[in-house]
Image (spheres, rainbow, N blue to C red):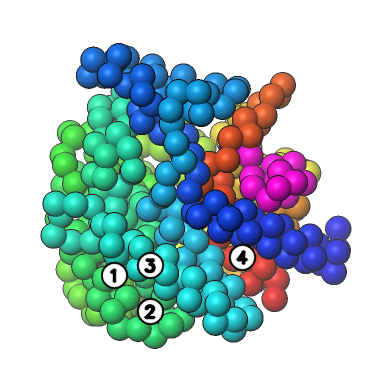
Amino acid sequence: MSLADFKPLLEQSIRKLERWIEDHNYKGYDPADGLTSYLRPLTFGNLFLDRLLMQLIWRSPINLRPLLGVKPLDSNIGRGYMAWGYLTMFKMNGNEAYKDKAASCLEWLKNNKAPGFEHYSWGKMFDFASRGGRQGKYKPITVWTSLIGQAFLDAHEVIGDAEYLDIASDICEWILELPRNHTGSGLCLNYTAFWDGDCTIHNQSMLAAAMLARTAKYSGNSDYLKVAKEAITYTCTRQLPDGSWYYGEDSTYHWIDNFHTGYNLDALKCYIENTNDKTYENNLKQGFDFFKNNFFESTGRPKYYHNRTYPIDSQCCSQAIETLANFSDYDQSSLELGMRVARWTIENMQDRTGYFYFMRYPLMTLKVPMIHWAQATTYKALTALLLKLN
């Protein structure tokens, strides 16, 4: 498909998705929202039973949520991604409505920060249970807080309001207070504000480092730069010889997947560009080469793992499009591949009503309309691609 044919398809997809999200007042389901069900008391606070209920609702081929009392919710990270996408649209067409919608999402985030924490930070709108333990409702997590922080930095750059930079700096203060896993080669920032004794996962630490580095570009804060460099060092010195990263260094986390690799690459690129520290530039090249060569089929269909395609996950689609768009000024083949992935995603994952499906398996499709996992992330990714094409 030529660029002339593809752009109208992309623009139409963005309009339909935008309308769906706004018509639903930024609310939707989340893969892990099962513990909001009225069946929750029947788990009696048992971690295994909580996980069982959550996974039953998460993985079911039928949307059990309406039957089990799980209602569409607001999403902190969803609002962050929408603000990001709106700002991208405003940069492209100067339509003040997009600036106003972005400001409205950011104002909502200001008013819904994690309760009980001095600094700006955000978490899930529901309790979460995994083999690693529990995350309580609203308890802030590093991935979401760092990504939302990037939206505030975008707003500072695009709108020019100094308050957005103040909030970004306050987010960085929260990051500096995170528990850390200190090693002989860098440090890993914890996934949550509470030490869980298992801090070897890369993506949240890298995203936090990117947030610190980009904010320091404006504030000049040397503490931000020092911690960012140490976090980048931790992950880059643990890159595998083929350019990939495990999800985490603990043997429990030894898998290599699409969207967490995308997080790592975007974060490393952000760090290098905002600090001009080129120590790990070769790691960036090796990592992106691995990403391009191992996570996509010739049709543009994104794979979940480097060695296995299914499930086709909407997060892999959206993050792949965003990372490929982001790297289009770094690698000439990136934009064409991003267009192929976006075309496949629009043609195979977008419902006629405008929203994007959650997940595809060989014999079934989970069509549940998730708000941040498929809608907000995809909106941000498609607008980023359109900006690069323009």
Is 334 left or right of 67, judged from the image as shown? right
Q: CB under 8 Å between callouts 1 and 3? A: no
Residue, disc 2: 156
Task: Give the magenta range.
Answer: 346-359
Q: CB under 8 Å between callouts 1 and 2? A: yes
Residue, disc 1: 168
Q: Earlier in the sequence, mark 3 or mark 2?
A: 3
Image position of 263 with respect to 170: above or below: above
Residue 206 is drawn in which quadrant? bottom left
Q: Secondary structure at mark 3?
A: helix
Few, some or many residues within 10 Å of mark 4 (<14, 14–19, 20+): many
Rendering coords of residue 112 (x, y %): 29, 57
Q: Which mark is residue 383?
A: 4
Under mark 2, the amino acid is His
Q: Please state which of residues 38 and 184 is positioned toward the viewer in this rendering.
A: 38
Rendering coords of residue 149 (x, y %): 34, 64
Which mark is nearer the camera, 1 or 3? 3
Q: Is residue 347 magenta?
A: yes
Q: Please state which of residues 233 and 8 is positioned toward the viewer in this rendering.
A: 8
Residue, disc 3: 106
Majority secondary structure of magenta residues: loop
Image position of 333 with respect to 290: above or below: below
Under mark 3, the amino acid is Leu
For the residues marked 1 and 2, what is the alpha-carbon distance in whole angstroms?
9 Å
Under mark 1, the amino acid is Ala
Under mark 4, the amino acid is Thr
For the residues marked 3 and 2, what is the alpha-carbon distance in whole angstroms?
11 Å
Q: Earlier in the sequence, mark 1 or mark 3?
A: 3
For the residues marked 3 and 4, what is the alpha-carbon distance in whole angstroms?
18 Å
Which residue lies at the image location 86% right of the left edge and 58% below the top edge? Answer: 1
